[in-house]
Image: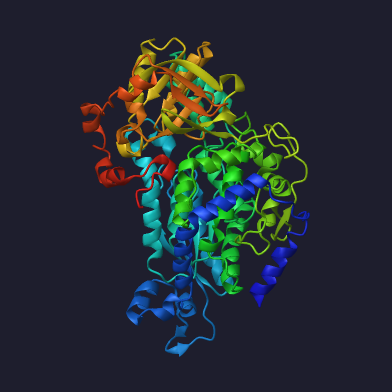
C-alpha cells in the first residue's frame, strides 16, 4: 500500500505541467514513422515475440534450481535474501519483492562517471524501503574519447560500444532480475547500455545519469587557445592550463557533444526520471532523483504496468529521439549509434529518415558547438523539458508513447526540484529564460534541423550544418588526400596547406581501423579557415558532436577499405561539397572516374593498424563491422 501512495503523490507532483490538447502530428513525422514501421515489420515482430515470451516466465528465484538461487543471492544480507527468495529459515515469507539489477559504468577516472560510485548504495536503500532488493549485476567498461583523442586507444572507442552491450548482456544473463537500472552517461556508454538492455527487452529499465560538471572556462575560449597552440603561439603549459580550466571537476563535459546528446535523447525516449539529464552532480536534488529512479522502475513492476524497455522503445520512440537530436543540433555520432540502438529493438532506420525529418524539424537550441552556451546555460534557459514541450505542442513528437512513467511523455516537459520536505516536484519551464540559447517552435533559430545527408559519386555521408555558418555550406576546391590524420598534421605544420582546399582523410572507417574520431583535425583546419581560405574535410571517419566550425562530410560510406569511392580520389581532384543541395561530388569526367582504379590501403598503414594498445583483440569486430549507415554493428 505504501507504494501505491508513492505513485499517487508522484502524479500530484506533476500537476503544474501544462496538458494542452495533443496537436496533429506533422505529416513528415507521421510519414517517416509509418515507413520505418513498414520496413521493420518482420524484424520488429520477431523481436517482440521474443520479448513477450521472456516476460511470461516465472521470476528467476522461482524458475531456477535451488543451487542456482543460492549462488545468486549468497552475498545478500539475510533480510534481503528472504525478501527475494520468499523463504526465511525454511518458512515461506508472506510477500516477495522484485529484484533490481544494477549495471554500472562507474570508474573514477572519467569525470562523468565518478559520481556514480555511491549510486548502488542509494538504490539498495531505496529498494528496501519499498519491499524490494537490488544487486549490482555487473560493471561495463567506460572509456573517454577526450583522453584517447588522437592516440592508438581511440581506435577501440567505437567498438567499446558493442563491448559495453555485451558486458551488459553478461551482467543481466544471471536472469534473476525483475527490473534494471542502467548507470552511465558518455559517448559509447549509453548506446552500449541501451543495446544491451534491449536484448533483455522484457525487463522494465530506467537509465540513471550523473549530470554535467559546473561551468569552467568557456568552450569558445578553450577553442581559441587550441587554435593558438596549433599555430605555435602558445606552449604546452598555457594549453594545459586552459584545458584544465575547462575540464575541472566531476560530471559530464559541458559542451553539447555525444555524451550530452545521449542524455537529451534518453529524455525524449522517456527512459529517464523526467528532467534528470542536466542536473549537476552536487545539486541538492540529484540524490533524490537517483532514489526516484529506483522508485520509478519499481512503480512499473509493482503496479503491474506493462512497460518493459522492449515495448517502450518502438518506432515512435526512435523517431522522437531522432527529432530531439535534430531540434537540438546534437552529435553526428548518433547517426551511427541510434541506427544500432534501433536495430537492437528490431527497428530499421537509415540516413534518409534523418534527412527527411531534418527538412521539417526546427532547430530550437544554440549550445556549443552550435552556439556559445554550454549545457548548464541550456538547462537554465529551459533545458530538455522546454524543448520536448515545444516539439510536442507543435506536432513534431509522438505523445502517445509508453515511457517509464505512468503519465507518458508529457511528464518529460517538467523541470524537477525538491520541496522543503525533500519530496520531488516538476514544474512547467514556462517561457525561454534566454532566447539566445533556447527558442520556441514558433520562432526557431532555423526552420530545419541540424543535420544534412550528402550524396554523390563519393558515396553517402552526413554533415552537421547547424555548426557551420551558411556562407560555408558550399565549398568547391581541389583536394589533398591523406591516409591518416597524422599526415594532415604534418602537412599543416610544413605550411603546405595554405590555399582553398578540401582535405580527404581516408582509411578511417569501421573496417579499416575501428573508425576513430578525428576531432584533433579541427584546430588546424579552423586556423586555415581563419586565414580566409575555403576549407572542408571529407572522411570515412567520425567527428565528435564537438566538431563544428569547419564543413565536414563525415562517415562517408562505403568506406575506402571496403572498396568505397574515396579510394579513387587523387591529389588535385576538384571536389564540391554542397550542403544546400545535399551533394558530395568529385568533379572528374564520368568515364575517367569509372575507369580509375581503387587504391588499396598502404601496406605500412595496414601493418600498423590494429597492433598494440589492445587493438589486436578487436580484429574480429573490424572484420565483421557493418557500414556506418548500418550502425557499424559488429554483432549482426
Q: Foreground residue, 311 or 231?
A: 311
Q: Which colour scheme is used?
A: rainbow
On screen, residue 5 above or below 334: below
Q: Residue at 69%, 72% (x, y): give it.
A: 5
Q: Which residue is drawn at 51% across and 73% down?
A: 98
Residue 470 seen in the current view: yes
User: Which residue shows up at 55% across the image and 51% down it?
Assistant: 35
Instruction: Residue 145: give x, y in percent of width and height.
Output: 42, 37
Q: Quadrant of residue 47?
A: bottom left
Front residue of 299 and 23: 23
Spot occupied by residue 65 in the image (x, y as percentages of width and height) = 35, 81
Quadrant including the N terminus = bottom right
Is the residue 505 above or below the residue 85 in the image? above
x then y, percent, for residue 597? 27, 25
Task: Let me know if residue 250 appears in the view.
Answer: no
Residue pictured at 51% horizontal, 80% vertical? 96
Q: In this view, does 80 lie to the left or right of 214?
A: left
Amino acid at each position: 500500500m505504501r507504494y501505491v501512495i508513492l505513485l499517487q503523490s508522484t502524479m500530484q507532483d506533476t500537476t503544474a505541467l501544462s496538458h494542452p490538447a495533443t496537436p496533429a502530428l506533422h505529416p513528415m513525422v507521421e510519414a517517416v514513422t509509418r515507413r520505418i514501421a513498414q520496413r521493420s515489420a518482420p524484424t520488429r515482430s520477431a523481436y517482440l515475440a521474443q520479448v513477450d515470451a521472456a516476460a511470461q516466465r516465472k521470476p528467476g528465484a522461482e524458475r531456477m534450481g535451488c543451487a542456482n538461487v543460492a549462488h545468486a543471492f549468497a552475498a545478500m544480507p539475510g533480510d534481503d535474501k528472504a525478501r527475494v527468495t520468499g523463504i526465511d529459515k525454511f518458512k515461506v515469507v508472506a510477500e516477495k519483492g522484485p529484484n533490481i539489477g544494477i549495471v554500472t559504468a562507474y570508474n573514477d577516472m572519467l569525470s562523468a562517471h565518478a559520481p556514480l560510485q555511491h549510486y548502488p548504495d542509494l538504490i539498495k536503500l531505496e529498494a528496501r524501503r519499498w519491499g524490494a532488493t537490488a544487486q549490482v549485476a555487473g560493471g561495463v567498461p567506460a572509456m573517454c574519447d577526450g583522453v584517447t583523442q588522437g592516440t592508438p586507444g581511440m581506435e577501440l572507442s567505437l567498438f567499446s560500444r558493442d563491448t559495453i552491450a555485451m558486458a551488459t548482456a553478461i551482467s543481466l544473463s544471471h536472469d534473476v532480475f525483475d527490473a534494471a537500472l542502467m548507470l552511465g552517461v558518455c559517448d559509447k556508454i549509453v548506446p552500449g547500455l541501451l543495446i544491451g538492455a534491449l536484448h533483455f527487452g522484457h525487463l522494465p529499465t530506467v537509465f540513471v545519469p550523473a549530470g554535467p560538471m559546473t561551468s569552467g572556462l568557456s568552450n569558445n575560449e578553450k577553442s581559441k587557445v587550441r587554435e593558438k597552440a596549433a599555430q605555435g603561439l602558445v606552449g604546452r603549459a598555457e594549453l594545459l592550463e586552459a584545458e584544465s580550466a575547462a575540464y575541472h571537476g566531476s560530471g559530464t563535459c559541458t559542451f553539447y557533444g555525444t555524451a550530452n546528446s545521449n542524455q537529451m535523447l534518453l529524455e525524449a525516449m522517456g527512459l529517464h526520471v523526467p528532467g534528470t539529464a542536466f542536473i549537476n552532480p552536487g545539486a541538492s536534488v540529484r540524490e533524490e532523483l537517483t532514489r526516484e529512479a529506483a522508485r520509478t522502475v519499481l512503480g512499473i513492476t509493482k503496479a503491474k504496468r506493462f512497460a518493459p524497455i522492449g515495448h517502450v522503445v518502438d518506432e515512435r520512440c526512435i523517431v522522437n529521439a531522432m527529432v530531439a537530436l535534430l531540434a537540438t543540433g546534437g552529435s553526428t555520432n548518433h547517426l551511427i549509434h541510434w541506427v544500432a540502438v534501433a536495430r537492437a529493438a528490431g527497428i530499421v532506420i537509415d540516413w534518409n529518415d534523418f534527412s527527411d525529418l531534418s527538412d521539417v524539424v526546427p532547430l530550437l537550441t544554440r549550445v556549443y558547438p552550435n552556439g556559445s552556451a554550454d549545457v548548464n546555460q541550456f538547462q537554465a534557459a529551459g533545458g530538455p523539458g522546454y524543448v520536448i514541450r515545444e516539439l510536442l505542442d507543435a506536432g513534431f513528437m509522438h505523445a502517445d508513447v509508453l515511457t517509464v512513467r505512468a503519465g507518458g511523455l508529457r511528464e518529460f516537459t517538467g523541470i524537477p526540484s525538491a520541496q522543503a520536505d525533500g519530496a520531488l516536484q516538476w514544474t512547467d519551464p514556462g517561457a525561454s529564460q534566454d532566447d539566445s540559447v533556447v527558442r520556441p517552435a514558433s520562432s526557431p533559430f532555423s526552420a530545419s534541423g541540424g543535420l544534412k545527408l550528402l550524396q554523390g559519386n563519393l558515396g553517402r555521408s552526413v554533415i552537421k550544418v547547424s555548426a557551420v555558418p551558411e556562407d560555408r555550406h558550399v565549398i568547391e576546391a581541389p583536394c589533398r588526400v591523406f591516409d591518416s590524420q597524422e599526415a594532415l598534421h604534418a602537412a599543416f605544420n610544413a605550411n603546405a596547406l595554405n590555399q582553398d582546399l578540401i582535405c580527404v582523410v581516408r582509411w578511417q572507417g569501421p573496417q579499416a581501423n575501428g573508425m576513430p574520431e578525428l576531432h584533433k583535425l579541427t584546430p588546424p583546419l579552423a586556423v586555415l579557415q581563419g586565414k580566409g581560405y575555403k576549407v572542408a574535410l571529407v572522411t570515412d571517419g567520425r567527428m565528435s558532436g564537438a566538431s563544428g566550425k569547419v564543413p565536414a562530410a563525415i562517415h562517408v560510406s562505403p568506406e575506402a577499405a571496403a572498396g568505397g569511392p574515396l579510394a579513387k580520389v587523387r591529389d588535385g581532384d576538384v571536389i564540391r561539397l554542397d550542403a544546400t543541395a545535399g551533394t558530395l561530388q568529385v568533379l572528374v569526367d564520368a568515364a575517367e572516374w569509372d575507369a580509375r582504379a581503387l587504391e588499396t590501403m598502404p601496406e605500412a598503414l595496414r601493418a600498423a593498424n590494429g597492433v598494440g594498445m589492445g587493438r589486436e583483440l578487436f580484429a574480429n569486430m573490424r572484420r565483421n563491422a557493418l557500414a556506418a549507415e548500418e550502425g557499424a554493428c559488429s554483432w549482426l
